[in-house]
Image (cartoon, grey):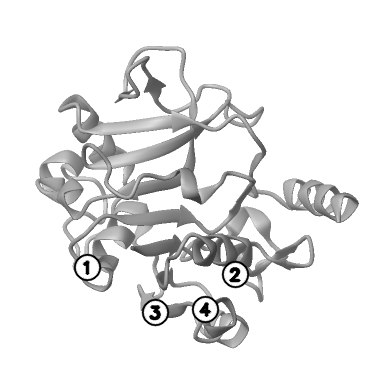
């Protein structure tokens, strides 16, 4: 099984920390955020990982190399100076990910979620991990029903953790899902993943699970500092 780690964001809310360092390479607990993911992916038997890059792209191979220290083979899917967002970035990386299901993880989160709990074969087009809504995102994203299906409407809602398993089939008909969103008609196309997921949810093709453990969206310097202090205290 292969994996994709999203690492192409501009990190604008993290400046000045991201002026010279991409957000996934910022350190917490003595290692880059992305290194926590790479270690966990290697531990469950993943051997090939694709990183999509844009802002300060050369810094990734400088810091991570070819992945050999984790027993991985890293490939870099460079998107140019303007990131393709989550949907466009995943679509752009598909040729490197193959035809089977793959794991995708946001490079700027930290969690104690055990990646071994992810299904190797999702029942539909994707299996997403959800968490309780954090203070900075109280409205949540999706509804998880008693049968493990996800819905775009209704309540109560949970927050998408930025961790999932996807099939390439998710992108069949993606153009109708994103419509005329800015960037969708460019080459390569640039669009968010959320509309594609919502369209698949309407067809009953997305399942999920709730993670009740630790999870942080490292979106501000304050949250990075809090995470660093928490991890340092636990070492």
Residue closest to the far right = 233
Whole-number angstrom distance, CA of label 2 to CA of label 3: 17 Å
Task: Tell me where residue 63 sits by quadrant.
Answer: bottom right
Asked if the residue at tag 2 contacts the one at tag 4, i.e. Cβ–Cβ closer than 8 Å, the answer is no
SS at badge 4: loop
Q: Residue at x 66, y 76 (%)?
A: 20
Is the residue marked by circle 1 packed among few (<14), some (14-19), or many (20+) residues within 10 Å? few
Whole-number angstrom distance, CA of label 4 to CA of label 1: 20 Å
- Which of the two labelled residues, at mark 2 and mark 1, occupies the earlier sequence position? 2
Is the residue marked by circle 3 packed among few (<14), some (14-19), or many (20+) residues within 10 Å? some
- Which of the two labelled residues, at mark 4 and mark 2, occupies the earlier sequence position? 2
Q: Please provide percent x and percent y for residue 185.
A: 16, 57
SS at badge 2: loop
Q: Please provide percent x and percent y for residue 163.
A: 46, 46
Task: Tell me where residue 76 sits by quadrant.
Answer: bottom left
Question: Tag on residue 71?
Answer: 4
Whole-number angstrom distance, CA of label 3 to CA of label 4: 13 Å
Relative to 169, residue 200 above or below: above
Task: Tell me where residue 204 sits by quadrant.
Answer: top left
* Left or right: 44 in relation to 99: right
Whole-number angstrom distance, CA of label 4 to CA of label 2: 23 Å
Question: Tag on residue 179?
Answer: none
Disc 1: which residue: 98
Q: Please provide percent x and percent y for residue 213.
A: 64, 34
Q: Is residue 192 visible?
A: no
Asked if the residue at tag 4 contacts the one at tag 3, i.e. Cβ–Cβ closer than 8 Å, the answer is no
Disc 3: which residue: 75
Q: Quadrant of the N terminus?
A: bottom left
- Which of the two labelled residues, at mark 2 and mark 3, occupies the earlier sequence position? 2
Disc 2: which residue: 22
């Amino acid at each position: 099984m292969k994996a994709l780690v999203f690492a192409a964001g501009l990190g604008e809310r993290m400046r000045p920390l991201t002026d010279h360092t991409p957000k996934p390479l910022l350190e917490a607990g003595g290692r880059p955020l992305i290194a926590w993911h790479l270690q966990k992916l290697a531990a469950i038997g993943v051997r090939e990982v694709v990183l999509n890059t844009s802002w300060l792209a050369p810094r990734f191979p400088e810091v991570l190399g070819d992945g050999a220290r984790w027993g991985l083979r890293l490939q870099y899917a460079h998107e140019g100076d303007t990131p393709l967002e989550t949907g466009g970035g995943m679509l752009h990386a598909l040729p490197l990910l193959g035809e089977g299901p793959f794991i995708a993880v946001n490079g700027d989160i930290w969690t104690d979620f055990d990646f071994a709990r992810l299904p190797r074969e999702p029942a539909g087009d994707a299996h997403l991990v959800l968490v309780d809504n954090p203070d900075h995102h109280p409205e949540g994203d999706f509804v998880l029903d008693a049968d493990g299906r996800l819905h775009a409407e209704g309540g109560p809602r949970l927050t998408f953790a930025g961790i999932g398993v996807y099939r390439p089939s998710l992108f069949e008909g993606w153009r109708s899902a994103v419509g005329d969103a800015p960037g969708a008609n460019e080459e390569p196309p640039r669009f968010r993943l959320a509309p594609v997921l919502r369209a698949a949810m309407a067809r009953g093709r997305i399942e999920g699970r709730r993670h009740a453990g630790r999870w942080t969206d490292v979106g501000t310097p304050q949250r990075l500092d809090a995470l660093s202090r928490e991890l340092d205290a636990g070492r």
